Image: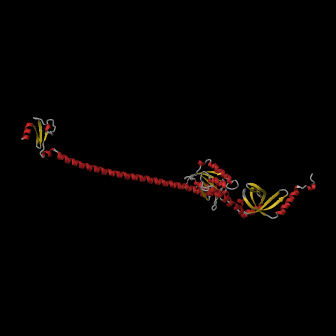
Amino acid sequence: MVPESQQLGLFDLMQHLRRLVSLNLPQPLWLRAEIAQLKKNRSIYYLNLIEQEEQRPKAKAKALLYASSRHRISKKLGDTFWSIMREGQEVLIKVQAHFSEQYGFSLEILDLDASFSIGQLELGRLNNLKRLEQEHLIELNKGLELPHLPQRIAIISSKEAAGLQDFLEQLNANSQRYAFRTELFQAAMQGQQMQKEIREQIREIEEQEDRFDCVVLIRGGGAKLDLYGFNDYELCRDLAQCSLPVLTGIGHDIDESLADLVAHTALKTPTAVADFLVHQLFLAEQQLALLQQELRTSVQGHIRREELRLEQLHSRLRLSSQERLRLAQKQLEHFDKQLELLSPDKAWKRGFAQLSNEEGQIIHSWTDLQDGQRLRLALKDGSKWIRINIEAIEDETEG
């Protein structure tokens, strides 16, 4: 058995450790760590701090933020304080080390360096931007075609977000009375679960993408640091690769998140997104009116051209008919002259006679004559029947 003189009570050990801590860490110091867990109540915030190396815990410690310090720090930093004090955030905090015989080692938070957290967030943003550019994701969603009538809208937002109500009111109260169909896919717009919930809703929408024309990601205002949650690489990758055009209205007039950068169309506020969608329908209506006018003008022009063509054909037909009549008239006149020249009266006046047999056949040749044949002889002043004597004619011819 170990001698009693060599034994040490728990209280004595803890008291010894308290003295060591008090002796070696008498003054507050600035500590860099990540908030692994944060639990809040009215008077005290309980934090579990962690330092990791290659995604594995290297050191852990408990920290306490009392109400008095919290009020002082939040008054100094404003909304920035609430954006920094969240799980997963790397912080630079001023702490006082304590050791209690009953509760062990703990750190009391006295102050917070916001510039460190902002710098870490900005560094993370730049690294994620470089990665998105290397993987050609910045322009991917922009390559999708937004329908001319984007009326079926999948909304990713928080149902409590003021920006959601602003968006819906602006969309549904449009002066043109365009109709829209919207469906909300609920997701946190800040906090540790934001990226995870938004990504889940993107996948949910893609499973029924034929029901929607586009995705709208909107939130209200809020602290500037809340915007850094939209710089998450995996969130931005899923937005870029979404099968539907993504429109963002995250609610910051100056700063642009990486989610805005990879979106099809980035607008500053939810109201601006609503105005954009209404304007798209207005442009489509104007384009339709222009096409109708062009069609009407084209049809009228075609009809006029056909009318002119018919008028030209009619004119050509009228001229052609007149020309044919004139030519026919000339031919008739020519025929009249020919008939006049060939008429028996003209021939008889020139000393011609007509000789025909009893059958009325005209005698053209001596071979048609027979001796003693009875013939009809027609002269200009009448006709008589005669009988010929071929001998006599032949004798007279010979004489």
The percent coordinates of residue 128 (x first, y second) are 66, 57
Instruction: State whether residue 281 is above or below residue 77.
Output: above
Display coloring = secondary structure
Most extreme residue toward the left, as rendered? 399
**In the picture provided, is 378 more to the left or to the right than 332?**
left
Residue nearest the observer in this picture, 45 or 261: 261
Occupied quadrant, residue 70: bottom right
Q: Write the residue at 87% across / 59% down.
A: 16
Q: Is residue 299 visible?
A: yes
Check the picture and name the quadrant holding the C terminus: top left
Residue nearest the observer in this picture, 28 or 66: 28
Most extreme residue toward the front, as rendered? 398
The percent coordinates of residue 250 (x first, y second) are 64, 57
The percent coordinates of residue 276 (x first, y second) are 58, 57
Q: Give the mark count.
A: 0
Q: Is residue 174 visible?
A: no
**In the picture provided, is 205 more to the left or to the right than 21?**
left
The percent coordinates of residue 372 (x first, y second) are 9, 35
Occupied quadrant, residue 3: bottom right
Residue nearest the observer in this picture, 230 or 39: 230
**In the picture provided, is 225 more to the left or to the right than 393?**
right
